Amino acid sequence: MNKLLNKKVITILLIVVAGICIYAFWRTPVPKKCPIQTDEKVEKILPAFEEYAKKEMANWKIPGMAIAIVKNDKIVYAKGFGVKTIGNKDPVDERTIFQIGSTSKAFTAALVAMMVDDGKVKWKDKVIDHVPDFQMYDPWVTREFMMEELLEQHSGLPGYAGDFQAIAGFDREHIKHSLRFIKPATSFRSEFAYVNNLFLVAAEAVERHTGKSWEKNITERIFKPLGMKDSSMGVEPLIKSKNAATGHSFAGNEVKTVPADLKWMYIYGPAGGINSNVLDMAKWISFQINDGKFQGKQLISAENFNYVHSPKTIANIGKGPLTFYCASWVYQDTKPYPMIWHDGGTTGYRTMVAFWPDAKIGMVVLTNLIPNNLAEALPQYFNDLYFGNPKKDWSGEAFAKVKKAIADEKSKEPKLPVQPVPSMVLEKYAGAYHNDVYGDVTVDKKDNNLEITVGPDKFKILLKHWDKDMFTSIVLGEETKADVAFAVGADGSVNTMTVNSINQDGCGLFQKK
């Protein structure tokens, strides 16, 4: 009897305890997905901002987007829109990972600023004093090139000089070495021209002084102190992530996914190889608007942080607000306060990071479609809403300009002759070709076409006959009409091959061996 009573008492006690636990669980508030703070001024404009963002996202056909806004050192807004992959229902949220493209450049500049703080580098030191094998085409430029100028986009090089090397699989060492072969387009320090390759040199200087890779420096000196736990470098973390957005691009008017394993932007890591989400990037923005301080700790001196943000190179004259390139940032004379920003684009993603230092507010926009200009338009629209400027349809204007540019480009496309002149037998074009930047490439007959193989990854460019000794190229599914021209001598033998689509920097002419 006593045993039975004891069992009943124990059962009742267990039921009571279970009830208390259930009640406590029910009463306990569910934690928020991210630490969002409130800001009255931001809250007031959010409905209009969100409505505009969603409307224009559909206009640009962007599958997925995420936005975060930071005020002082607090995240006051973070939200995902749309889907990670077109045709899929998996939604983008504030933790979804995107490639951030050229907004990675500012991370490299931050490492250089840390080297200056550490007394290992001075901004006006000669590059050759830190990277002895650095060499430009002009010996005088090689001698005079200063460390800060690796970040300031006035090198005299043609815009995007040598970029196809990364797509073809050449490594960082090869790309840095090729600088000596690329002829300048302008005088040194005279004009703005955007390049990626010089950021590899800046990263090498950091590596030489620390004995650690660029990737390890970013992780130890930036990601960890800022708590950017979801951020990474390299294609593998992106592919293996359970919450990553797929990249997209256009095929005609249709949006398509791009291959997930493309790695050229990671070869160009110091210029564009970081993966992140808006929550992590919000911490990066807080770091910017608080002059190198994060959660009370000064990671970079305010002096050197301001140096990085200060104007260095005039980037436009007479094209809207006065704009300067800084050291991996852009300074724009918006009203009432200047905006510091940088955008980024990879094969499938478009990014924008912007902040207003005087107002201690900033935002990041991550999208998974290229091309689109909504990422750049939204901070401008936010600027007008937040500061009470007259409203302007920044996205609509950008969309109209892009549409016109596409139409203009289409109208300039070569027209196929009514009676194209036949080519020589394809075997005559085949063989080995060479230039100093891309090294040896081969041209082979492939069925009834030709195929160029270039780089250590044996990257393929398919050629289809256009007219006489000219061929249309197909690269990653994109067709460029009358792109490749072979020069034939009086004896009927081929002397050179010019690939016009990679000759904007003068590096697309190949001599037949």
Image (cartoon, helix red, strand yellow):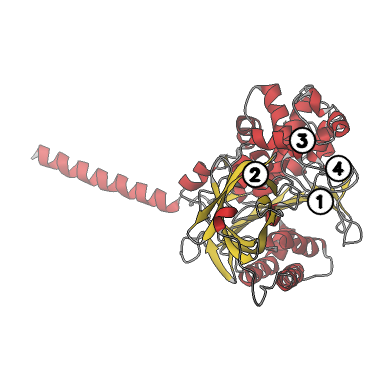
Q: Residue furthest left?
A: 1
The amino acid pointed to by label 1 is Ala
Are circles 3 and 2 on residues that touch, CB within 8 Å? no
Could you say where residue 138 lies in the image, as x and y percent from the top left? Answer: 85, 35
Mark 3 Cα-neighbour bin, 10 Å: few <14, some 14–19, many ≥20: some
Q: On the image, numbered disc 4 is attached to which residue?
A: 310
Q: Which of the 4 image quarters holds residue 410?
A: bottom right
The amino acid pointed to by label 4 is Ser
Q: Secondary structure at mark 1?
A: loop
> Is tag 1's residue or tag 2's residue first in the polypeptide sequence?
2
Circle nearer the viewer, 2 or 4: 2
Q: Which of the 4 image quarters holds residue 249?
A: bottom right
Residue 295 in view of the camera? no
> Is tag 3's residue or tag 4's residue first in the polypeptide sequence?
3
Q: Secondary structure at mark 2?
A: helix
> Is tag 2's residue or tag 4's residue first in the polypeptide sequence?
2
The amino acid pointed to by label 3 is Arg
Q: On the image, numbered disc 1 is attached to which residue?
A: 359
Q: CA distance from mark 4 to mark 1?
A: 16 Å
Q: On the image, numbered disc 2 is attached to which residue?
A: 165
